[in-house]
Image (cartoon, rainbow, N blue to C red):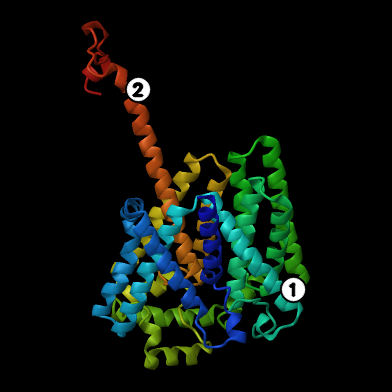
Amino acid sequence: MKLFLFAEKFFWSIFFFGAFQATAFISYFFGGIPFEILIWLTGYLFALTVLVFFPREFSDTIVRNAFFLLWPAVAILSYQWSLQPGLSLYHGFQLAMTVLVALAISQRLALPDLLKAIFWTLLAAQFLSLAAAFLSLPFAFYKFGEWRGIFAHKNVLGQQMTILFYTSLILFSMGWRRKLTTLAMVLAVFLVVRSQSATSLLAVLVSTGLFSILIIRRAQPVMAGLYVSMAMVAICGVVFLLALSGTDLVSGALAGLGKDSTLTGRRVLWDFAEASFAENPILGVGFKAYWEVPAISSYVRQVIGQELWHFHNNYLEVAVAFGLIGLVVFLSVIALVVVRTIGNFIRDPAIEAIWPVMFMAHLLIQTLVENPLFVNHAPMQLLFVIVGAKVTASREAARNARAGSAAAFAGPYRGLSLPPGLVAQPGPLARRGF
């Protein structure tokens, strides 16, 4: 059994390596082989294996988290009115399988095991990215010399290193391999700065500040002071590296879309999104259809001057694809997970309960400038469902525990009646109608 559990955790680490888009560099050596698709197919098979061997547990997990299936349901149904019906149906199915794989992971891995699997995966990607850059391999650099390591884009490197940063921070606080997690944090910040991903730099600063606030509710006063001091040092270190590298957060974020501080480029891109939404306000144009219609997408790319595949705003992207109905469904699921994540943090005294809060803060930042959610085979989509399933399971466990405690307390007294003199009588305020 121990060997099986080890093999399972090892498999998920390998799966995460592909799911986190760390296999992009392989195409540099073996072009044309769809490694990412192959990785996801193995994830599909493993999810089906979990369903076969643990049918009741997995079915309960799916039912408990059925709200996540609203997104792929809307995506699949959109083929009825999509500008590209076949494409919407195909990617809608992939989105459904992404959700099921995430639910399988949430069932099979406890949160500490999940954090360790993420850590080992991204640590390997970190070391490979550093090696590729220091060896000056061509694929390690983006258009203007920004580092992208083994990933397809500099922003993807920044995103994954941000996740590694706060995952390492939590594991360090749990007392797990503190020397290694410290090294991972330092190198993660270094790679985020070298990627010049302004969104990721902002996310590192926010997650560090958020951790310094949340840890006060978890650790003993002395340790909390130590952690807060470390967080402040980390923030100063990031600011120092930014100054040393000459990185401008605002200019860097805007340059990603070929625009200046007037927001002209983004405003033009948003105008295209708003125009499409105005033409199809209720149902939209279908899942991923907008960018697959050459007459539309080629014109947008020509005007913006970038090879774009989304509007760099998750809410506009969903509004264009699914109209007002889809946007309401999208916001409802996010709001539900945010509320449950906060509730889980308040309810669960464990340090690892901070990680879902930090992830959701990172995710919400990304939704404003990228398209991390409502996307098939996307790493943030995968982690979003896992986090949502974890906090939902915690909520159900807390409810069951309260119900069990109430039943245990009432058990010895069930069926007994109190003497009339001991029955509570309405007070004077109640008798007056208050």
Residue located 32% across and 51% down the image: 56
Say whether residue 344 is left or right of residue 13. Answer: left
Observer able to see residue 282? no
Question: Could you say which disc has been placed on residue 246 in the image?
Answer: 1
In the image, 336: left or right of 207? left
- The amino acid beneath tag 1 is Gly
Tag 2 residue = 409
**Looking at the image, can residue 181 be seen?**
yes
Q: Is residue 329 left or right of residue 376?
A: left
Q: Residue at x 22, y 19 (%)?
A: 432
Position of the C terminus, as image quadrant, is: top left
Q: Nearer the viewer, mark 1 or mark 2?
A: 2
Task: From the viewer's side, name the closer residue of 103 and 364.
Answer: 103
Q: Quick one: 1 or 47, which is closer to the camera?
A: 1
How much space separates mark 1 and mark 2, taking CA atoms?
64 Å
Q: Residues within 10 Å of mark 1 (few under 14, many from 20)?
A: few
Image height check: is 342 above or below 163? above
- The spot of residue 332 in percent (x, y) is 35, 59
**Other residues around mark 2 within 10 Å, as few (<14) / some (14–19) / many (≥20):** few
As helix, strand or loop, the secondary structure at mark 1 comes to loop
Q: Residue farthest to the right?
A: 244
Q: Disc 1 or 2, which lies upstream in sequence?
A: 1
Classify residue 100 by image quadrant. Answer: bottom left
Amino acid tagged 2: Phe
Using the image, determine if residue 392 lies above or below residue 28: above
Q: Evaluate if marks 1 and 2 touch, with contact meaning CB atoms under 8 Å apart.
A: no
- Give the secondary structure at mark 2: helix
